[in-house]
Image: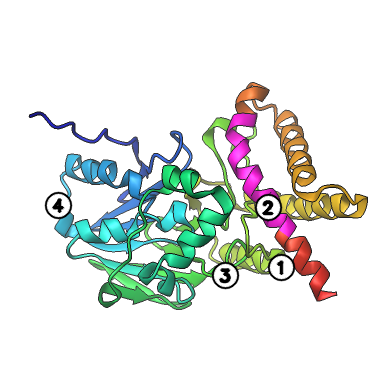
Amino acid sequence: MSTTSPRLPAAQDLGHGITCIDTEQQRPGLACCYLLQHGGEAALIECGTSHGVPGLLARLEQMGIAREQVRYLIPTHVHLDHAGGAGRLMRELPNAQLVAHPRGARHLIDPSKLIAGATAVYGEAAMQAIYGEILSADESRMIVADDGYRLNLAGRELVFIDSPGHARHHFSVWDAVSQGFFTGDTFGLSYRAFDGPAGPWLMPTTTPVQFEPEAWERTLDRYLSYAPQRMYLTHYGAVDEVPRLAHELRAGLIDYQHLAMSVEARGADRQPAIKQALYDWSFAELRRRRVDIPEALAREWLEFDLDLNAQGLVVWLDKQQSAQ
């Protein structure tokens, strides 16, 4: 009987011992993880979903990296596109320790609330199709990384900073070797399909339920205090021109809030109206930046994210009202 080997996911060598590997969620170029290699050891930043684990392991094998060489598995936060595959990967990487934010660690040990929350958002069938089986992680193999925690990868120091705004259980990882941050979702989304003459375009990600714009502004300030040369985004790939992109992301966060409050003031059916306003804003930005992409394809690329962004803005509006 023949067996079919997992298809190798796309990978890109970014220099500095860093490889971007597509985690193959829904479509190519949507989400990635980063493999760091140094001194014969390896770390994976982000885990992808359970569906992507066989391909990721096959890519490690193709690169000549033994599973025993992977010392750390580091999801930036516990949203399932970043951490859904953590439990399954930990079963395949015998020497790895799972590094988690203090607010997120318990959800990796017992993912029942993550599963329930995602099922409430997507429905059970879609939840399984998108994320697959969510397995628990062994608490005895976990490191809880508080703000300022320093991790040693064969002499290469990784520094963890608390980075709320997108989620309270989110950290980012500073790598002095590359002069870059692994930012998860807190430096926005930037798909390569939307690159234009002016370079990459960043858009906010206001996924429910912890969008906090004031905290996000402080996180951006903290990023810039390191004078980073590049940012490694989970969605998707490495970007430079960090000060310009930070400025544009701040403007986008302000625009998102104004759009949501405008819909609220009109008394419209909020979520679909906010989603349409986000589409209009996005298409206007793409035209302004002269991005050469058909509108139908842009809509296809934006659909999933803008649906989640609209949901998150509704939650944010409700919190604003309850605080008054």
Q: Nearer the viewer, mark 4 or mark 2?
A: 2
Who comes first in sequence, dot 4 or dot 2?
A: 4
CA gap, disc 4 to disc 2? 41 Å
CA gap, disc 1 to disc 4? 43 Å
Left or right: 268, with 124 as reference point = right
Marks 2 & 3, CB-CB < 8 Å contact:
no
Q: Report the disc number at residue 214.
A: 1
User: Are there few (<14), some (14-19), or many (20+) residues within 10 Å of tag 3?
Assistant: some
Residue stretch in magenta: 299-314
Q: Amino acid at mark 2?
A: Gln
Report the residue at 49% width, 71% height from top.
161
Element on which disc 4 rests: loop
Left or right: 285, with 79 as reference point = right
CA gap, disc 1 to disc 3? 12 Å
Who comes first in sequence, dot 2 or dot 3?
A: 3
Q: Which residue is mark 2?
A: 311
Q: Report the disc number at residue 168.
A: 3
User: Are there few (<14), some (14-19), or many (20+) residues within 10 Å of tag 4?
Assistant: some
**View extreme (left): residue:** 1
> Looking at the image, is 166 positioned above or below residue 121?
below
